[in-house]
Amino acid sequence: MPKLSRLLPALLLALCLPAHANWHLDGESSRLSFITGKNGEIAEVHRFLVLHGSVDRKGAAALRIEMDSVSSGIPLRDEQMRDNLFDVQRFAEASVQAQLDLEPITDLANGAQIELRLPLTVSLHGQSHRYNALLLATRLDERRFQVVTLEPLVLHAADFGLLPGLEKLRTFAKLNSINPTVPVNAVLIFTAR
């Protein structure tokens, strides 16, 4: 019986840990993508390959995007986006910050989901703007949850001072137009540590 008396508190602590743990982004399993439009009829999907993120015990959520990890599938275009659009020498990262109420998420049973309408702040190219995002949080198991955008987050180049860089891209690629409005989608996996 003494073994059980020592084991029971340890098991209870293990079960409670995820609710009180810090959550860290699994960058390998997560994805942040955006869609660009050019010449009025062509749409292309791009993504960022390097993401960092966490949610602390109080629900403060932070996502950092390494802007030089942009990937369009065309190396020369990636270089142009890094240098002329995002200006990664001056603005190496973009970020998204939000405050979560963790209790409804950590109380979910494995496989259960909850929709969240969440205000968040996007900081990009030295500018910050607030948005209301519609997200779906899914409890994957005792130590992992997933957050996905149910609706794309629509960013406007003008809000972040990106129009001059967009014009440089348009001129370089000899395009008639590049759409200054970009839908962004995310699939983010967080693990308790």
Image: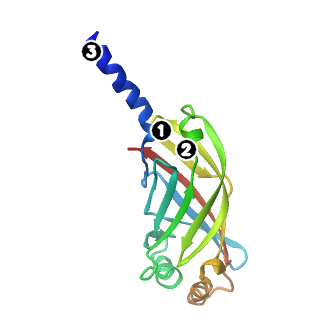
Q: Quadrant of the N terminus?
A: top left
Marks 1,2: beta carbons within 8 A: yes
Q: Mark number for residue 3?
A: 3
Q: Mark number for residue 19?
A: 1
Q: Quadrant of the C terminus?
A: top left
The residue type indicated by label 1 comes to Ala
Q: Where is residue 155, by image quadrant? A: bottom right
Label 3 packing within 10 angstroms: few (<14), some (14-19), many (20+): few
Residue 96 appears at what percent x and percent y? 54, 63
SS at mark 3? helix
Chain-order first, disc 3 or disc 1: 3
Which residue shows up at 46% across the image and 34% down it? Answer: 142
Label 2 packing within 10 angstroms: few (<14), some (14-19), many (20+): some
Chain-order first, disc 3 or disc 2: 3
The residue type indicated by label 3 comes to Lys
The residue type indicated by label 2 comes to Leu
Q: Where is residue 163, by image quadrant? A: bottom right
Chain-order first, disc 1 or disc 2: 1
SS at mark 1? helix
